Amino acid sequence: MKNLFSILFLILFSLGAQAKDGYELWLDYQPISNPQLRNEVSSLFSGVYFFGQNPTFDIVKKELAISGLKLVNQDPVFRTERLNPTKLWLGTREQLSQVLGLQQQVEIQKLDEDGYWRGPIDFQGNTYYAIIGNKPVGVLYGVFDWLKSIQTETFNLKSEKSDYPKVKLRMLNHWDNLDRTVERGYAGFSIWDWHKLPGYIDPRYIEYARANASLGINAVSLTNVNANARILTTDFMKKAKVLADLFRPYGIKVFLTARFSAPMEIGGLKTADPLDPEVISFWKKKTDEMYSFIPDFGGFLVKANSEGQPGPHEYKRTHAEGANMLADALAPHGGILIWRAFVYSHEIDEDRHKQANLEFVPLDGKFRDNVIIQVKNGAIDFQPREPFHPLFGAVKNTNLGMEFQITQEYLGQATQLVYLAPMWKEVLDTKTYSPSSNSTVAGIVDGSDSNQKLTLMAGVSNIGTDRNWTGHLMAQSNWFAFGRLAWDPYLSSEEIASEWIKMTFGQKPDSNAKIKEIMLDSHEAAVNYMTPLGLHHIMGRSHHYGPGPWVEGGRADWTSLYYHRADSLGIGFDRTDSGSNALAQYAPEIANSWSDPTQIPEKYLLWFHHLPWDYRMKSGNTLWNEIALHYDQGVKSARKMKSTWDSLEGQIDPERFSHISQLLAIQVQEAEWWRNACLLYFQTFSNRPFPSEIEKPEGDLEYYKSLDFPFAPGIRPRW
Amino acid sequence: MKNLFSILFLILFSLGAQAKDGYELWLDYQPISNPQLRNEVSSLFSGVYFFGQNPTFDIVKKELAISGLKLVNQDPVFRTERLNPTKLWLGTREQLSQVLGLQQQVEIQKLDEDGYWRGPIDFQGNTYYAIIGNKPVGVLYGVFDWLKSIQTETFNLKSEKSDYPKVKLRMLNHWDNLDRTVERGYAGFSIWDWHKLPGYIDPRYIEYARANASLGINAVSLTNVNANARILTTDFMKKAKVLADLFRPYGIKVFLTARFSAPMEIGGLKTADPLDPEVISFWKKKTDEMYSFIPDFGGFLVKANSEGQPGPHEYKRTHAEGANMLADALAPHGGILIWRAFVYSHEIDEDRHKQANLEFVPLDGKFRDNVIIQVKNGAIDFQPREPFHPLFGAVKNTNLGMEFQITQEYLGQATQLVYLAPMWKEVLDTKTYSPSSNSTVAGIVDGSDSNQKLTLMAGVSNIGTDRNWTGHLMAQSNWFAFGRLAWDPYLSSEEIASEWIKMTFGQKPDSNAKIKEIMLDSHEAAVNYMTPLGLHHIMGRSHHYGPGPWVEGGRADWTSLYYHRADSLGIGFDRTDSGSNALAQYAPEIANSWSDPTQIPEKYLLWFHHLPWDYRMKSGNTLWNEIALHYDQGVKSARKMKSTWDSLEGQIDPERFSHISQLLAIQVQEAEWWRNACLLYFQTFSNRPFPSEIEKPEGDLEYYKSLDFPFAPGIRPRW
């Protein structure tokens, strides 16, 4: 009760005032306090000149109007004549060609179609600050980068900066159903109000586009990969068209998910066989119709023959035959077909880990040029920590895209602060040793270590109708970090965290350092209290909320027992050659070292090895004690995150302080729940006592097993 | 496309600024421009003295802090000593007894426990402005009324005002499911985030309580009447407790829906027979447990033996036996049992209209004192216009409560502006002629025309997670109007509209007059384009979105054919003695006059009469032409609403202007859709041409019948 009233007090305190509810995201544009910077920026806003006109520049103007008012309390002055006293120049390389040297033009041209250059230009005795792109959207990206440099107080009027995205398609995947539920959504419901479209435009659509453009995200798939064919009907195309029209000036292309059985469900055909002429004709017509509404439609995203979704295997056709049929319908319009590698079925292998490679490696070279195979970062399913997916490096003539999950399905969902950039970076930075000894996952994804031109990084969105977009305000950092890494996979997670914190909470070095510490500790904390040392997929059944190491029955590879394989002798999944031999799917350099439990990084140990409870770890502890201590360390880390945050009271506005403080309190409880439930459960196999430093669990194993969450978010509830 | 860009422009224009998104509801507290009023109010805020301390006064202080800052840009000065220069006095009658005359104390005491008095008090040579309640919540109500008088510029420092609620329980019914879907919800999803409770308190819970308290709403049922027994488990009680604790200082009691079969579903019993000792014991223990968490728990709301919900009839027990068993469990704690009269089954009568009376009149006098029978305003189901429910006036020894539907299930849902106060007033003002010749529905509901002491007005909530709370911003007026009428059923809908408009849009006489005109025209417009002249229940199947006069098959009294009974001879439901004789359930004064098609108000004509297509109306038109012209008039009215609103461009902030303008455009389309679909359909029976002034429909009947809305909001979608 005491706690309730202190929270209530904080909330009451923030009512009525201009509460910081997180809606502004990282585009809050707090007033600049540094006087020199303020003067410089103010001066630039006092004379803005565009070298041309187009819908994207209208967006840029609006962004300058919003930011000018907020940063320096000044409406930008837009000049219609360059000869007027102008300060800030904006335009494409071509538009500025008369004021640029040839050398500079060549250098800007090298920046790719989405790149930008910004910096001082001397022209006829005056110096201007220019932001130049090869296309209008490059100008937009340059402006957002410039505004970021102001927000983070790194802007230097005298220095140049140029940048370009390393990956061609930087894409959000929404797993949003047409009834506005969101599969694995923890931030309310879908922001797409299909029922009110095309007649009603929610202002949020525009804010969404702004936020994505500010990161360089240039593609969105609006609908769930567990697709509904209705999205391909004319009525829904008219709705999608409105969104595409709105997003176009922001440089964002719309994709939709295509249900493989759509020819039967909405086309009246008796088959969806990809080689059937009527099916081919159905998709061609559907695609042509789509382009009649959306001339720059991005393409289709397909989940086929996976978890019950229909696909070409029903007709004894390969993934390549299925994907190519759709790709051929899209090709005349310049569309792209994205086919997910997350495919598995009972029949193919006893280890789900191996299935994507078993299915896709034999098809290498058989996909059309406009097909991308979208591969999850790991071979199982977005676990708190996974070794990289062995398909990266295993094919040479197939476009591979990366699929990360921004929404925290297995990582604390709505109630936990877990900054995901370190997890993604761990995968991106890993050496694959194939195609060459220096190859990394990032290098394959961005094409620098592979010969693919069509590159993709996709993130499964964590966006919903919650006022702060992402449910947990701190989860905004994951949307941000995904966008930044899709633009440049070589950025560090520290760097990205620093940017986001400054843009979100303003310039407060002391509290920002503590927020950064919390963020950077959070992923390892979650791994420790959920699935340390390579344990995986031991969450509650179906909703994946909280611990469920006891989950058994039903489809084997959807149970926890399948993955942890605990028994009286030990624990872990043997994927060496004495077991499933999934390790053989990696390059020999990896397979060899990871096959040896003393060489494999211990964080992956139980992912690949089944080891005795008394196995001696590098620390000197037995495996059982080491597992227990990792779980306990996770709890301690969560508590530290909470106490660090609470030390910021008074330094953070009360609404955001209370929001995050409350959620961190839940996170501590959930960490304790995870530790207690998992250790009590695994103890039934290990038959060993807890190390003495571990607190006695509050409940017994039966209590933890009895907990039931039929209305957990992100799933269709059990009634 | 042109339209899209003009909307986009409006939206862009409102980004970044302090957009008026409707979140503040009618508590926006716009700055006062009238200088005299400003000075007076400012002076009162400069010396505020509370005669006591309690959690409700803390809420009052907060409300003064919010409103002072916004209305007169002044933080209120709270004095701890009365002798300091204080101006505004607040407290209960008892607390102020030393400064009040005896006569005045007596008069305030008469105002009932929720009443308040406010006005000038002379004391020891000085004049103070005092707001006094019999209880702390009366002070809260008095303060909200005082703030309203400032917002509407009707405050007079020198005059007194006292008021008290005419109805004891002023209640919202949320039809919110535990998975956050809302049955018949058109404003997003449930604001109750059960998953994050009890750990996380959404600031919105407080705003919700504030808004309700500002209207005098003092009870809320949190869960759907199609109930889930899980809400009665200990885990969920702990969640509900948090909400009850938050709402308590606002004078709001929490009710929950009780699923009659809960003893079997969560109690492990084999029966839910209300006379079974184990069942009785289950409910007693459950209720005791509930009160251990929520000592002032309001009670249960039950839908039983209706539309498939379980109830006492399964055990051959009466509604009274079912209700009394629950009432007995609640009585020791002071709890109330609300039992819905919306019960019907195939067996009881061929006319659903008659069923509630057939079931409840024989039980008159058999219900416990702490039972209220909650009766919908009409006998069918929240139709655009219904004659009052014949149960009002038909029982003498049963507590009857009124159930209105604020959410617009049958009245345009998310996309139509329909101000409902005129519809509710039409029912409340109707004379029932029983128990006495002067009785009205309002008089029965508030107890002045009946001998019931426990009175109730309930409204099915239109609140959801949409930022503006109600989906359509103008639908906030329905929440507001419901609250005002529950407080005082004798207010006029014009008066309520005026208050709401001023509090929502500020003091702008010109535009406010136009907004009021739109609101007051809107209900009759909707009746005309949906169900004129007594037609009813001809909406689309299940979702009730748009026209579905052709709906047939399945349960008869869920089809349109059952209700309109159109055939080659005529149209309408014969409820006279030549038909179902439902009219006999009304007092003879009504039954006699309404049995005569020339005497019944024509707005109810086809509700009670089946008449030939060529029947001559008072206008001189044939019935067929009159129907057609009413539909057309509805379209014309919708168009006028739209053009009137659009004339306000520039006078309303761009965000709200665009929001409402877009939705009115949809409303016009939907009005046309209704007219065209219904007239084309009924024409297949009438075989008569449309009157010449009617526009040719865009589509044919087959087109309108083909429209399909599997993802319409407010229902469980068909996949």
Image (cartoon, coloured by chain):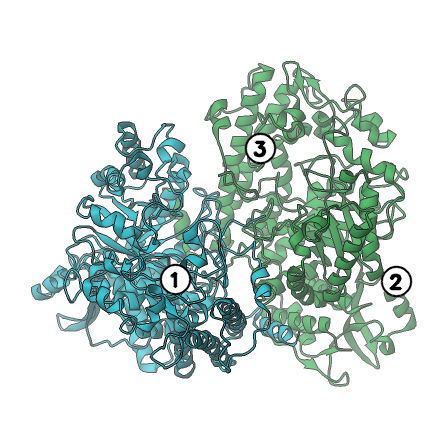
Chain colours: A green, B cyan
The disc at residue B383 is: 1
Which residue is identified by label 3? A541
Q: For mark 1, name the chain.
A: B
* Residue A518 percent across, percent down from the top left: 59, 43
Quarter of the image with the N terminus of chain B is bottom right
Position in image of residue A296 (x %, y %)? 76, 64
Drawn side of residue A302 relative to residue B373, left or right: right
Contact check, label 2 and label 1, Cβ < 8 Å? no
Vertical relation: B260 (above or below) B559: above
Q: Are marks 3 and 2 in contact (CB under 8 Å)?
A: no
Amino acid, disc 3: Arg
To which quarter of the image does residue A26 belong? bottom right
User: Is residue A30 among what the camera can see?
Assistant: no
Give left or right: position of B262 versus B194: left
The crowd level at tag 2 (other Cα within 10 Å; few <14, some 14-19, many 20+) is few
SS for dot 3: loop
Mark 2 belongs to chain: A
Give amino acid for label 1: Gln
- Kind of residue indicated by mark 2: Lys
Label 2 – label 1 distance at C-alpha: 66 Å
Q: Residue furthest left?
A: B102
Q: Which mark is residue A110?
A: 2
Compute the Cα span from label 1 to label 3: 43 Å
Q: Nearer the viewer, mark 1 or mark 3?
A: 1
* Same chain for the residues under marks 2 and 1 in the image: no
Out of B634 and B110, give the one closest to the viewer: B634
Tell me which label, 3 or 2, sits earlier in the chain.
Answer: 2
Q: Is residue B478 above or below residue A370?
A: below
